Image (cartoon, rainbow, N blue to C red):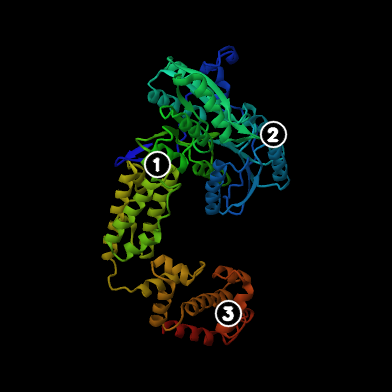
Amino acid sequence: MLSIDDRLLLFWSNPTKEIPIRPHRPDRYPREDARHWHDKEYAGWGAEKLPMPESPGDGPRGKRIAFLQPGTHPYHVAFAEGLTRVAERAGVVLRTYTASMTEESQDREVRRAMEDRPDLVILVPISSEACTPWVREMHSRGIPVIVSNYIPKEEAYRYILAWCGPDDWGQFRMLARTFADLVGHRGGYAIIRHIPGSSCHDARTWSVVTELAATSPDMTCLAMGEACRDGVFDPQEGRRLVEGWINRYGRDLKGIVGPDDDIIVDGINEAVRAAGRHDIIRVGAGSTHKGMQLVKEGGLHAITFQSAHADGALAMKIAADWLGGLDIPPIVYLPKHVITRANVEEFLSKKPEFSSVSLEALARAVRDASEEQVDRFFEDAYQSLLDSELMTPEFFRGFCIEVLSTLIHILKTAEVDERAIFDDYESLYRNLFNQKTPRNAMEWMKRLAKDVIRVLSMQRPAESLVDRAVRYVNRNYTEPLSLKVLSVAFGVSAPYLGRLFHRAVGKSFATYLNELRLRKADDLLRYSSLKASEVAARIGYSNVNYFYTLFKKYRGRYPSEAADGAGTGPRKRSRVHSLERK
């Protein structure tokens, strides 16, 4: 996490987790001792994986990914939204299999997904126990799997590409320390546990108990219980639990730790209001908008930073990286943070992800030599960065590389030697990655963009836009070209460029491009051994029949006649040259 201009900028990161030496017999320690839970808290670290399916290495576009969702709990719905957004940007064909928050229903969905033979599976398992046979069978069928959110049993890690999600044990230890501060490090507390069978059931209970036993020994866990029915949270069960605790423990009950910041919190707060016990400190998990509003208004006193949107986005990002042939870490955590009334406004103002910033706007500003527009582009980009809920270092680095690529493309299009601004590409990117903060990187790129404006202003001041476009077409006629492609390259609209082109050249862009290509084709057919289909591909036509039609229209004969060296060749060739000179 970085603090920039007194604003929070959170980065996904994957620091090496400090793993203590495993006790010889963890089960011999009491449950109030963190060593008892070693195998659950550090599950997956150091697991020996079986040989994994090989990545196709050609990227996520068009790949079929199955998302196995445990149910329609609000967190899982938001998780799916974050995952879907990344899938859409990556061009993934996503199919979601939604269970009904029971092991039996998810088992049916797992079977359906395996029969569909997807290219990759993202699994959020409802049960840590059931996860292992599911991923074992997928692995045996050669289906790559990424497990997310709930922590599986240790053995499951042998069969999966990676696990990603919140560090439940770590972040609840942070929450426990904040909770202790809020209650003054003394007194009794109670815990409403997560759904049985999920990894959160133990993580969000025993991380708190063991952390407080070690750091705040004057605090006592008075009670713990579950507030769920048929595998889902039930706020009325939560209210019943809390009412019983208040009646039983009275003023000895100083605080309550909840399993979420949404559904169960409603039941907790109803019981607190009914008893007039607003002094009870309440903390929970998650950072939904509702939860953050409760923190702001005093209905909750602290929650963990756990964005469901970011959780889902992270899983799909890792999937896309693997499909692209990148190495992926075996375990990737969301960032850990605790939200309190002191900082909740920062988080409320954030958006789930970095808003897209148009690089075309930057290209247009540079070509128009508008330093004011360049300033505005980088200020808008930086503000979007600050407002984003999460930003991966890789994503920010990729954005910077796209900016540099845009500036380099402008220089190349204008046939300007890049060395007028920088020595070589290596030094350019080294300067970028040497920037200490995102703010510094933005300022450095802004100065570079203004340097490009300065150099362009000294190059061919009288050359028109159409002159540059014609020169670009003459050099790149073998590539897929269109007015739209040129309009993006030169930062103007396609209709505007088309009108300018016709007015200056005396013919439409399409006519000019076809005449240029077909004149080149005529030369290749007459003076090389290439077949007509090979010539078509060489000059930029993927459809051979279309090439034949155009050749007949513009050259007055078929390609086979040109290859035979028909006597009309020189006359026809002269006509095309005369057209180009107009």
| 519 is higher (above) or lower (below) than 23 | below
Sequence-earlier tag: 2 or 1: 2
**Is residue 128 visible to the viewer in this orientation of the structure?**
yes
| Residue under pointer 3 | 550
Q: Toward the viewer: 12 or 388?
A: 388
Mark 2 and 1 residues: CB-CB less than 8 Å, in contact? no
- Quarter of the picture containing the N terminus is top left
Q: Which mark is residue 136?
A: 2
Q: Toward the viewer: 215 or 449?
A: 215
Secondary structure at badge 3 equals helix
Q: Position of residue 158 (x, y in %)?
A: 63, 30
| Residue under pointer 1 | 347
Give the foreground label among 2 and 3.
2
Q: CA distance from mark 1 to mark 3?
A: 60 Å
Mark 1 and 3 residues: CB-CB less than 8 Å, in contact? no
Q: CA distance from mark 2 to mark 3?
A: 58 Å
Q: Amino acid at mark 2?
A: Arg
Q: Amino acid at mark 1?
A: Phe
Q: Toward the viewer: 466 or 77?
A: 77
Quarter-of-image position of residue 498: bottom left
Q: Position of residue 454 (x, y in %)?
A: 26, 61
Q: Amino acid at mark 3?
A: Leu
Give the foreground label among 1 and 3.
1
